[in-house]
């Protein structure tokens, strides 16, 4: 081998070695797939906590005052009172009425809730027996008036017997005012006398 060829070969070898060394020494080790490299998280794939949409937030709304359920006050209104229904029976002035069955000997007086239950021959519907009953029915200041014109049975056959008893703003001249006090003699007409009725309205007091 001549000297020129040996020198050229040696130079080529040196270049080849320095090229390989350049790769090994100059390689930072950050090539694809290299375990030693630090891979940064892609910002586009970062897990970010989602903020609740305020428009879908569950909010408790206050109740509408216009639809508040309020229990009725049952204490409003006049108090109830009792209708004297014959010598021994009394009826609620607000929920019933007295029926006088003149022709009955077994049940002459009873409380009923409808006039249709007191529509027999000679029956008398009594919706009051005093001014207190009128006030209970919403007619404060009214008088309880018995309208005559009926005829009686047995011992009452010679007396004027009530055909109806109801509250009126003022009893007519042909009416009998009921519910007066025998002790106080408080008839609206001072010329009348308050007595205990035995025929016109048995069990009650009347101005006569």
Image (cartoon, grey):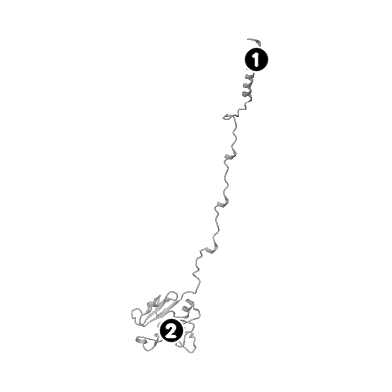
Left of 164 or right of it: where is 16? right
Chain-order first, disc 2 or disc 1 = 1
Q: Residue at x 63, y 17 (%)?
A: 12
Element carrying mark 2: strand
Separation (CA) of disc 2 from disc 1: 155 Å
Please tell me which residue lies in front, 203 or 127: 127
Q: Position of residue 17 (x, y in %)?
A: 62, 19
Q: Position of residue 184 (x, y in %)?
A: 48, 84
Contact flag, marks 2 and 1 (Cβ < 8 Å) = no
Q: Considering only vertical position in the picture, is 184 above or below 13?
A: below
Q: Which residue is mark 2?
A: 146
Please tell me which residue lies in front, 61 or 115: 61
Element carrying mark 1: helix
Q: Position of residue 198 (x, y in %)?
A: 40, 85
Q: Considering only vertical position in the picture, is 152 above or below 68?
A: below
Q: Position of residue 44 (x, y in %)?
A: 58, 40
Q: Quadrant of the N terminus?
A: top right
Label for residue 8?
A: 1
Label for residue 172?
A: none
Q: Quadrant of the C terminus?
A: bottom left
Quick one: label 1, few (<14), some, or many (20+) residues within 10 Å? few
């Amino acid at each position: 081998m001549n000297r020129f060829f040996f020198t050229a070969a040696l130079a080529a070898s040196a270049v080849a070695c320095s090229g390989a060394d350049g790769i090994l020494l100059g390689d930072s080790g950050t090539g694809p797939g290299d375990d030693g490299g630090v891979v940064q998280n892609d910002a586009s794939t970062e897990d970010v906590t989602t903020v609740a949409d305020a428009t879908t937030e569950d909010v408790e709304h206050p109740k509408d005052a216009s639809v508040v359920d309020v229990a009725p006050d049952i204490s409003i209104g006049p108090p109830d009172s009792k209708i004297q229904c014959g010598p021994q029976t009394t009826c609620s002035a607000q929920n019933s009425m007295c029926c006088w069955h003149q022709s009955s000997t077994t049940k002459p007086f009873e409380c009923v809730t409808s006039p249709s239950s007191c529509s027999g021959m000679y029956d008398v519907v009594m919706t009051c027996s005093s001014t207190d009953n009128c006030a209970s029915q919403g007619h404060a200041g009214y008088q309880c008036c018995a309208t005559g014109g009926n005829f009686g049975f047995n011992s009452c056959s010679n007396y004027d017997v009530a055909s109806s008893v109801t509250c009126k703003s003022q009893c007519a001249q042909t009416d009998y005012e009921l519910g007066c006090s025998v002790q106080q003699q408080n008839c609206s007409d001072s010329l009348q006398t308050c007595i205990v009725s035995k025929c016109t309205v048995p069990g009650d007091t009347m101005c006569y």
